[in-house]
Amino acid sequence: MDGWIAKCAMAVPVVGYLVLFNDGVSQHISFNDLASEHQLSVLSLTASGRLKLIYFGLIFLGSANILYRLRRPYIFRVGTDQFDYVERALVHFTVDNYIDLNGVIRHEGHRTLHGKYDDAEFDSFVDVATGRNNPDVGNWNLAKSKFEGLLRSILIENFFRNDVKHRLALTCFLLLAFCGYGLLLIPSFDLFVKVIRVTIRGVT
């Protein structure tokens, strides 16, 4: 049910209706009707004005995307949200990663209740994972399975810490993207109004 064939099949009726709508509308509307300057919209946009809005909208969106990719914190390179980050980190992180994260949490202090785990429990995790006392009995898979709750707590604490630390920059990127979408929405709405007006005028 969740395969790509089912998803494509869901789009078939929509595409069909769009084709029928296009055939019906094209009988009453020509490109010149939509592009001509005398077909003035409620926003009073000229062709030059629409192009400028689209141009700067794309510039804003592209800038927001580039800045986000360059400045986004490492947690968002691992996962798109907290759940995705934790699940991916549990698969790909090594014991050294958890040792580093534990050092940061203990040095800077915890930000959430997830950071109040027991140090003795973490030491036990390292012992099982690396065989610190006996290298011959170190078992990484056993350590992950036995201390999964501890590892999740460390990862959630780390995600929250980095999310808060970079929230201002992420908010700026979002605002820049919203400005871009807003600029693109204005000529889109203008065209939508013109299509409706010309369609009604042509049908009547």
Image (cartoon, rainbow, N blue to C red):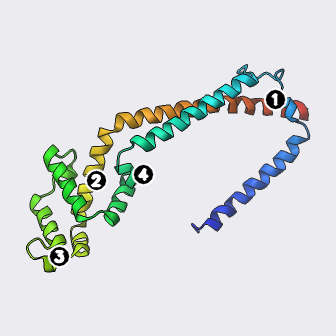
Residue 138 — which label? 3
Identify the image quadrant of residue 151. bottom left
**For the residues marked 1 and 2, what is the alpha-carbon distance in whole angstroms?**
53 Å
Label 3 SS: loop
**For the residues marked 2 and 3, what is the alpha-carbon distance in whole angstroms?**
25 Å
**Residue assigned mark 2:** 156
Label 4 SS: loop
Of callouts 3 and 1, the N-terminal one: 1
Label 1 SS: helix
Residue 149 seen anywhere in this rendered image of the structure:
yes
Left or right relative to 68: residue 73 = left
Which of label 4 and label 3 is nearer to you? 3
**For the residues marked 4 and 3, what is the alpha-carbon distance in whole angstroms?**
32 Å
Of residues 147 and 73, the one drawn nearer to the viewer in this rendering: 73
Of callouts 4 and 2, the N-terminal one: 4
Of residues 54 and 190, the one drawn nearer to the viewer in this rendering: 54
Q: Is residue 127 placed above or below 72 in the rendered structure?
A: below
Of callouts 2 and 3, the N-terminal one: 3
Would you call the spot at circle 2 few (<14 residues within 10 Å), some (14-19), or many (20 or more)? Answer: some
* Residue 112 position in % (x across, y down): 22, 47
Q: Quadrant of the C terminus?
A: top right
**For the residues marked 4 and 2, what is the alpha-carbon distance in whole angstroms?**
13 Å
CB atoms at circles 2 and 3 under 8 Å apart? no
- Residue visible at 23% across and 56% down in the picture: 154
Label 2 SS: helix
Residue 162 — which label? none
